[in-house]
DNA sequence: TTTATAACCTGAACGC
DNA sequence: TGCGTTCAGGTTATAA
């Protein structure tokens, strides 16, 4: 479900009721996620700690405490909601983080591809965690430039779509927005980096920033069951140009959108606009 | 070092 | 209506 805009929307939604609050208790109904929920969390050793700050790195949410950081990843089908503590748990509601203000942060994830992990402060906190330490720059930061991208990938032999989805090159570009950014840039998703011009790199970087920014402003994409933390759907789906639109007319030239598979993921493109 | 493939898991949508 | 098949927003571990 969640790409970067959805994670950012989640962050902004949960911040007001969780930052500066004390953790009462963690209730873990299902510890088998992508990896087992960290022992520190399963053993409730975070009870009594204050949540100093919540931030996002790539698609990870980080709850900082004085003793270390809770890393949360929503995987493919996860979401987080703020609810009153007496709200009954439904199917796939795997974890509740109870707070002293009477609310709880509830993690729901049917496919269990997500993660709840602990990064101890004594080991450097989230920045030193193996899943975080090797991530590429944030796409909306000044570090993500056309020069950087070209330098990183110009000798690679994967498709451009596969490369911009690689989190060691740049974080947060998931399947939907990779397809959309390539459409706006007029670049075929299977193109190799080598023949791309500096101008094309610049266009692509600009469009990645543009789609992600627009999606964040819209509150993320509505696909399947994505909900913001207050239970409302996002509204971006109607603005997608190519994703999920195989055989439908291109919004620019009306040529039917085509679909192919790259790196085990669906790629959608207009054969005329993206030669 | 880079690239390709398998794997984690459930549920919705589709074809017969 | 029921059953089998295919696909899905992510990412890592392992093989090649």
Image: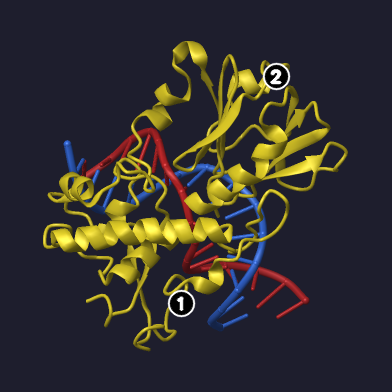
Chain colours: A yellow, B blue, C red
Residue drawn at the location 53% of the way across and 50% of the way down: A76
Residue A14 or residue A135, whichever sits in front: A14
Image quadrant in which you'd find residue A19: top right
Q: CA distance from mark 1 to mark 2?
A: 46 Å
Residue A191, horizontal then vertical, whole percent: 21, 65
Outermost residue toward the bottom in this view: A254
Local crowd size for mark 2, using a 10 Å CA cut-off: few (<14), some (14–19), many (≥20): some
- Looking at the image, can residue A95 be seen? no
Residue C5 or residue A189, whichever sits in front: A189
Residue A229, horizontal then vertical, whole percent: 68, 48
- Looking at the image, can residue A209 be seen? yes
The N terminus of chain A - image quarter: bottom right
A193 is higher (above) or lower (below) than C3: above
Outermost residue toward the front in this view: A142
A260 is higher (above) or lower (below) than A65: below
Residue C1, horizontal then vertical, whole percent: 77, 76
The residue singled out by tag 1 in the image is: A245
Label 2 chain ID: A
Is disc 2 placed on a helix, strand or loop? loop
Taking the image as shown, residue A156 lies to the left or right of residue A188, namely left
Image quadrant in which you'd find residue A168: top left
The C terminus of chain A - image quarter: bottom left
Residue drawn at the location 44% of the way across and 70% of the way down: A243
Residue drawn at the location 40% of the way across and 26% of the way down: A130
Q: Which mark is residue A44?
A: 2
């Amino acid at each position: 479900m969640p790409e970067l805009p959805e994670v950012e929307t989640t962050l902004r939604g949960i911040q007001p009721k969780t930052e500066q609050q004390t953790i009462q208790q963690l209730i873990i109904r299902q510890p088998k996620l992508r990896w087992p929920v960290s022992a520190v969390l399963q053993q409730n050793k975070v009870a009594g700690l204050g949540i100093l700050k919540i931030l996002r790195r790539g698609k990870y949410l980080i709850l900082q405490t004085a003793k270390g950081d809770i890393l949360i990843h929503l995987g493919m089908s996860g979401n987080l909601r703020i609810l009153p503590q007496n709200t009954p748990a439904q199917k796939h509601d795997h974890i509740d983080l109870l707070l002293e203000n009477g609310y709880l942060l509830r993690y729901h994830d049917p496919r269990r591809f997500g993660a709840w992990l602990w990064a101890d402060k004594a080991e450097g906190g989230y920045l030193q965690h193996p899943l975080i330490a090797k991530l590429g720059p944030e796409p909306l930061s000044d570090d993500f430039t056309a020069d950087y991208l070209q330098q990183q990938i110009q000798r690679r032999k994967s498709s451009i779509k596969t490369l911009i989805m690689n989190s060691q090159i740049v974080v947060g570009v998931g399947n939907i927005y990779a397809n959309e950014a390539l459409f706006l840039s007029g670049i075929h998703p299977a193109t190799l980096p080598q023949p791309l011009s500096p101008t094309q790199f610049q266009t692509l970087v600009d469009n990645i920033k543009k789609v992600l920014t627009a999606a964040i402003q819209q509150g993320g994409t509505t696909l399947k069951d994505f909900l913001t933390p207050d239970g409302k759907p996002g509204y971006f789906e109607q603005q997608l140009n190519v994703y999920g639109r195989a055989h439908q007319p291109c919004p620019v030239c009306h040529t039917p959108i085509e679909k192919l598979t790259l790196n085990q993921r669906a790629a959608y493109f207009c054969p005329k606009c993206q030669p």
